[in-house]
Image: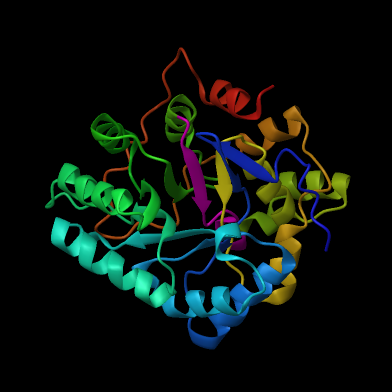
């Protein structure tokens, strides 16, 4: 597969840095299957990998990265600190353990996986900043933060990105607005809504127009929004290849709007310890569609 890196959607530019807009998610991939998935993905042309301490697969991700014929510096690697390890000493201990498992001296992005109201956020961020100063992570960010908590984090220190569930059935307009305002990367996990997009008539119609699948149209919709990257997980080689085959077409502004209108607040990842998601109505002076227009630059 030849990847057209000249496609504006191939990378998103965050704070002057180019990040591959499509990455490989590794949630629920373990052992040899995970290692082989990472090797195969890198061989296909993926240059963005996402893992986490809680996934219990950092060692396999590291092995896949080590065995692939790709320089470490060419891959954007993210890991995440679990919510029970956010005290400053635990941040350092668990991150250093992650680096050992991954077989690397640094990650490109270190995230708080889920907020923990029992540990002061600012203390966690300061511990992450110390690791950044030591070169153990190039950037820091958060995951699964609602808008007010993201604003609290940004008031304490600049961030590089936020990772959240984002797909056509769960709009993230308030977070997208903040990402645009602060030049943050917004990474979409569960980007195809656990394959629910396959049966959607709007996505099927748009897919037929372009000779693509509803999944490919959904991924293109996400990465065609400037600050957005997506990290679909796939255990099947054919699916990994198909997910990457989204750089030879583009959606029109009207197609982007039609997909955005599918939002119905469907959240698929909502554990007991999740924060208040703050899904109140959008402010009247900047409706959801206006935020999308800003993201796609139309």
Q: Please give left or right for residue 90 compared with residue 189 in the image.
A: left
Q: Is residue 111 left or right of residue 266?
A: left
What is the residue that sits farthest to the bottom in this orientation?
32
Residue 272 in picture, x, y percent from top left = 26, 60
For the N terminus, the image quarter is: bottom right
Against 296, is 96 above or below?
Answer: below
Residue at position x 61%, y 70% in the image: 234
Residue appearing at x 51%, y 39% in the figure: 171
What span is in magenta? 183-195
Q: Where 49 falls versus 170 (above or below)?
A: below
Question: Residue 105 falls in which quadrant of the image?
Answer: bottom left
Q: Is residue 42 visible?
A: yes
Q: Residue at x 68, y 75 (%)?
A: 40
Nearer-the-camera pick, 84 or 131: 131
- Residue farthest to the top, as pictured: 285
User: Residue 249, how many percent across, how many down?
Assistant: 83, 44
- Give the number of callouts: 0
Q: Position of residue 8 (x, y in %)?
A: 73, 38
Q: Quadrant of residue 147?
A: top left
Locate the C terminus by quadrant: top right
Query: Which percent across, then down, holds residue 190?
Result: 52, 57
- Residue 3 in magenta stretch: no
> What scheme was used to colour the molecule?
rainbow
Which residue is found at the position 73% from the left and 54% from the top? Answer: 216
């Amino acid at each position: 597969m030849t990847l057209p890196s000249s496609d504006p959607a191939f990378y998103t530019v965050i704070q002057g840095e180019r990040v591959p807009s499509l990455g490989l998610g590794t949630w629920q991939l373990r052992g040899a299957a995970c290692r082989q998935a990472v090797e195969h993905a890198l061989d296909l042309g993926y240059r963005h990998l996402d893992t986490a301490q809680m996934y219990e697969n950092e060692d396999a991700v590291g092995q896949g990265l080590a065995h692939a014929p790709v320089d470490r510096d060419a891959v954007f690697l993210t890991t995440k600190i679990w919510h029970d390890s956010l005290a400053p000493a635990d941040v350092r201990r668990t991150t250093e353990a992650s680096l050992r498992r991954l077989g690397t001296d640094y990650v490109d992005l270190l995230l708080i996986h889920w907020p923990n109201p029992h540990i002061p956020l600012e203390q966690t961020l300061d511990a992450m900043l110390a690791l950044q100063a030591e070169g153990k992570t190039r950037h820091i960010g958060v995951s699964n933060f609602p808008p007010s908590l993201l604003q609290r984090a940004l008031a304490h220190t600049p961030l590089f990105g936020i990772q959240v569930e984002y797909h056509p059935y769960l709009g993230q307009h308030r977070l997208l607005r903040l990402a645009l305002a602060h030049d943050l990367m917004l990474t979409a996990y569960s980007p195809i809504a656990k394959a629910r997009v396959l049966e959607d008539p709007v996505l099927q119609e748009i897919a037929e127009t372009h000779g693509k699948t509803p999944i490919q149209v959904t991924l293109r919709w996400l990465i065609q929004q400037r600050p957005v990257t997506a990290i679909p997980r796939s255990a099947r080689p054919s699916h990994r290849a198909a997910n990457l085959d989204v750089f030879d077409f583009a959606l029109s502004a009207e197609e982007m709007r039609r997909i955005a209108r599918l939002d119905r607040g469907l959240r698929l990842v909502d554990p007991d310890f999740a924060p208040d998601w703050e899904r109140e109505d959008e402010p009247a002076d900047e409706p959801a569609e206006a935020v999308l227009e800003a993201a796609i630059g139309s």
